[in-house]
Amino acid sequence: MGRIIAIANQKGGVGKTTTSINLSACLAEAGKKILVIDLDPQGNTTSGLGIDKEEMDHTVYELILDECTVKQSIHKTEIENLDIIPSNVNLAGAEIELLGINDKEYILKNAIDYIRDDYDFIIIDCPPSLNMLTVNAMTTADTILVPIQCEYYALEGISQLIHTIDLVQERLNPNLKMEGVVFTMYDSRTNLSNEVVDNVKTNLNTTIYNTIIPRNVRLAEAPSHGLPINLYDSKSAGAESYRLLAKEVIGREDV
């Protein structure tokens, strides 16, 4: 049975999409069969994996509204072992269209249950807010991976995210666990980055991945070329870091 990891943090700009794209690609490179679900209306994970989001008839939006089947919504990428359920701006209206629908918290889960055995890992890129899309991701997922940017306000909002995770565990998905925290945009030249890492380790009672994702120009450039970092610049520090993260994630199969 595939392991489902939701990548969530309601704070924008912390590296959720970068992590979704590159962790997925590095897991695929390691020979795992991967499905990425782009649950962000911005569709940046979709375009970052080389898919033209405006040309898609069957996206996660149509899937959620029951206008297509889960198999119809899955598209192959150019990357071996890596499929995607894409997203585009239409998804922004899903929250309103789901009003009044029974069990709307489980719409994604009910769809994904049909195909989860086809994949080793399913990675869900959540939107930067704690809305019904994020709740759907959390009811579908086994674990939540939280990227935290190494900057001054890193812990701001994390308590709110953990409170949401606790509520989902209590009311909707008792099996949900914290996958852990991964630090992103780390700059070894600054004291601040080191202070943030120490602060989070002191204040958060959760698993913290050993791999730290550095600030890296090649990592920032890759999405504009529609490529994950391991294909855009295989020898860059960003590519090496995400390979190490993928190795850690694979090593935690028993989570």
Image (spheres, grey):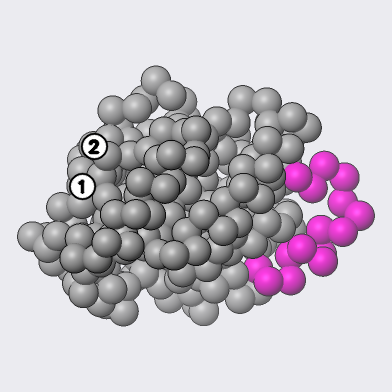
Q: Amino acid at mark 2?
A: Lys
Residue under the point 50% across and 33% down: 205
In the image, 234: left or right of 220?
left
Q: Amino acid at mark 1?
A: Arg
Label 2, residues with CA under 10 Å away: few <14, some 14-19, many ≥20: some
Residue under the point 59% across and 70% down: 41
In the image, 166: left or right of 47?
right
Question: Residue 163, located in which quarter of the rendered image?
Answer: top right
Rounded to the nearest whole Å, what is the CA distance between mark 2 and mark 1? 6 Å
Circle on res. 50: none
From this view, report whether residue 168 is shown above or below residue 186: above
Question: Residue 33, located in which quarter of the rendered image?
Answer: top left
Asked if residue 101 is among those painted magenta in the image, a careful observer would answer: yes
Q: Position of residue 44 (x, y in %)?
A: 45, 71
Instruction: Please report contact status of discs 2 and 1: CB closer than 8 Å, yes or no.
Output: yes
Secondary structure under the numbered disc 1 in the rendered image: helix
Q: Majority secondary structure of the magenta segment?
A: helix
Query: What residue does disc 1 label?
Result: 243
Residue 22 in view here: no
Residue under the point 47% across and 48% down: 146
Magenta segment range?
91-105
Secondary structure under the numbered disc 2 in the rendered image: helix
Asked if residue 34 is among those painted magenta in the image, a careful observer would answer: no
From this view, report whether residue 108 is shown above or below residue 249: below
Residue under the point 18% across and 57% down: 239
Q: Position of residue 198 (x, y in %)?
A: 35, 46
Residue 43 in view here: yes
Foreground: 71 or 233? 233
Instruction: Work out which quarter of the rendered image holds the C terminus and state it.
Output: top left
Q: Position of residue 27 (x, y in %)?
A: 28, 43
